[in-house]
Image (cartoon, rainbow, N blue to C red):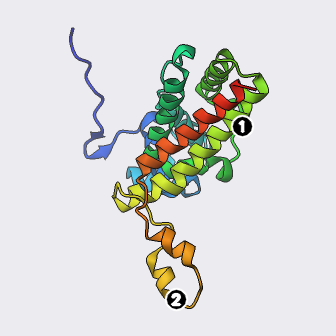
């Protein structure tokens, strides 16, 4: 079977624009600096084209944002969820979101930085939520309990991505962050903090170890609701 020829990224030394290329660059920019940094001027500069050239492919900035978010959701590859192996399914589902969030961490702030119209919501956001709720109901949770688990998991994953993975990835280390910087304790040697100083001296768990603990907590929450 003949291989498909890829469209060249440049033509006569100038970038070839497509909606996909614009969305990819916008998401890349948002992932590092947040969606507020995605302006038509900044995007044109990143792509090496004029602002006017962008308007040949997109109507306005809002369409760029919608395309970028759609690209992000399309990149999410959640696993098949099996009620017979629900604990592993929950772990794999959470792991798929962790990988997605680590790829474009600052883009997670979109709900704070942007007002996306309902028509721009990618269907996968709804379909994958439906599958998770269906899994939780199939293993025996009531719908209100399933919603509680979902909210807890979503909040945990979002905060984990921004407060644990993002700083670790920025620092380029797989080690855990200290409870408080040692310099803080040294600077306030006048304070009586015996428990805090003892805790700060303990080895910090790695991000992977903390993620395993997060999954264990959610799993325990589900088990507890099943026995009610």
Residue positioned most to the right: 144
**Residue at left offset 47%, top offset 35%:** 95
Q: Residue furthest top?
A: 1
Q: Which residue is mark 2?
A: 189
- Dot 1: few (<14), some (14–19), or many (≥20) neighbours within 10 Å? few
14 vs 67, left or right, is left
Residue neighbourhood size for the residue with mark 2, other residues' Cα within 10 Å, grouped as few (<14), some (14–19), many (≥20): few
**SS at badge 1:** loop
Res. 122 image quadrant:
top right
Instruction: State the residue lying farthest toward the left.
Output: 2
Taking 104 as reference, is 6 above or below it?
above
Q: Position of residue 74 (x, y in %)?
A: 50, 29
Q: Position of residue 51 (x, y in %)?
A: 50, 51
User: Could you tell me if residue 225 is visible in this image?
Assistant: yes
Closer-to-camera residue (157/185): 185
- Picture quarter with the C terminus: top right
Q: Residue at x 50, y 80 (%)?
A: 184
**Residue 38 in sight:** no
> Which residue position holds label 1?
117
Location of residue 16 with respect to 40 vertically, above or below? above
**Residue 158: x and y, percent?**
58, 46
Residue in front for this viewpoint, 186 or 64: 186
Q: Residue at x 57, y 43 (%)?
A: 157
Q: Quadrant of the image for the N terminus? A: top left
Q: At numbered mark 2, what does the secondary structure look like: helix, strand or loop?
A: loop
Viewer-nearest residue: 174 or 111? 174
């Amino acid at each position: 079977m003949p291989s498909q020829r890829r469209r060249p990224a440049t033509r006569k030394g100038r970038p070839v624009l497509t909606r996909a290329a614009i969305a990819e660059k916008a998401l890349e920019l948002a992932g590092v600096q947040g969606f507020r940094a995605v302006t038509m001027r900044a995007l044109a500069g990143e792509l090496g084209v004029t602002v006017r050239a962008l308007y040949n492919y997109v109507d306005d900035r809002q369409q760029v944002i919608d395309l970028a978010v759609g690209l992000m959701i399309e990149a999410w590859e959640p696993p098949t969820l099996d009620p017979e192996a629900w604990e592993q399914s929950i772990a794999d589902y959470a792991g798929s979101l962790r990988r997605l969030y680590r790829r474009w961490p600052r883009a997670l702030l979109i709900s704070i930085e942007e007002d996306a119209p309902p028509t721009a919501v990618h269907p996968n956001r709804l379909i994958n939520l439906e599958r998770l709720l269906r899994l939780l109901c199939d293993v025996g949770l009531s719908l209100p309990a399933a919603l509680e688990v979902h909210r807890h998991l979503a909040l945990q994953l979002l905060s984990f991505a921004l407060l644990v993975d993002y700083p670790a990835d920025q620092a380029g280390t797989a080690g855990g962050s200290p409870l408080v910087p040692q310099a803080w304790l040294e600077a306030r040697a006048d304070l009586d903090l015996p428990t805090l100083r003892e805790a700060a001296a303990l080895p910090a768990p790695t991000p992977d170890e903390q993620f395993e603990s997060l999954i264990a907590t959610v799993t325990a929450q589900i088990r507890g609701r099943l026995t009610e």
